[in-house]
Amino acid sequence: MAQSTGPKKIKCAVFISGTGTNLKSLIQFSKKKNSPISINLIISDNSKAKGLKFGKIYKISNKVFNYKNKIIAEKKMISEIKNKNIKFICLAGFMKILSKKFIRNFDGKILNIHPSLLPKYKGLNTHQRAISNGEKYSGCTVHFVNSKLDSGKIILQKKIKISKRDTAKSLAKKILAQEHKLYPKAIRKVFNL
């Protein structure tokens, strides 16, 4: 008798622009037996993104798209995603803003992680802005992506205390460690696990 391999995992693409530390934690999460996703594609807008090395390490195919022409890049991305039968997208430090048209193609199937307690500090330089404004707390948020920047429905948040000694760099490091835990939890929540 054939052994059952448990529920089929949902094919997922991860979009990165940089070091890919969230990508790495998502890959490790996807390898767990009870994870709802498998990562089948890594997409980047930056051929020098350090995170692309995880594609090699974990034997996951990766594609770099030149964003000089966003319309062409997104068309190619959509066809790559559909060819690979990807059903779910995780943005993990992807520094390009996806068009409404792209988002509509995968409505309700794109997650992003953002290094602040949304709706506060959308966009960039979140840590410095939180410190400059004398915030006592910051943190990270996993949310659905919609056509407004960092405005989709919030799935989970993690609050971090800002200490008097924190710099943007030290706060970023503290928050990143929490992001690695929060993203997998949020994915489980999306799939009701």
Image (cartoon, rainbow, N blue to C red):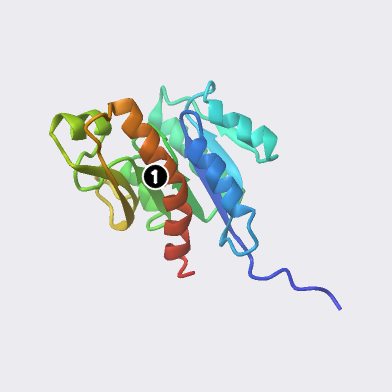
Q: Position of residue 130 (x, y in %)?
A: 20, 35
Is 171 on the left or on the right of 184, as rendered? left
Residue at 13% x, 33% y is: 133
> Can residue 96 be seen in this snapshot?
no
Q: Is residue 84 above or below residue 189?
A: above
> Can residue 32 be seen in this snapshot?
yes
Is 153 on the left or on the right of 113, as rendered? left
Q: Position of residue 144 (x, y in %)?
A: 34, 54
In the image, farthest residue toward the bottom: 1
Residue at 38% x, 46% y is: 112
Q: Which residue is mark 1?
A: 102
In the image, farthest residue toward the right: 1
Residue at 46% x, 30% y is: 17
Q: Quadrant of residue 97?
A: top left
Residue at 45% x, 31% y is: 72
Q: Quadrant of the N terminus?
A: bottom right
Q: Position of residue 152 (x, y in %)?
A: 28, 52
Q: At label 1, which amino acid type do we have?
A: Phe
Q: Quadrant of residue 9?
A: bottom right
Q: Is residue 85 above or below residue 59?
A: below
Q: Position of residue 12 (x, y in %)?
A: 55, 51
At numbered mark 1, what does the secondary structure look like: helix, strand or loop? Answer: helix
Q: Is residue 70 above or below residue 188?
A: above
Q: Residues within 10 Å of mark 1 (few under 14, many from 20)?
A: some
Is 34 on the left or on the right of 170, as rendered? right
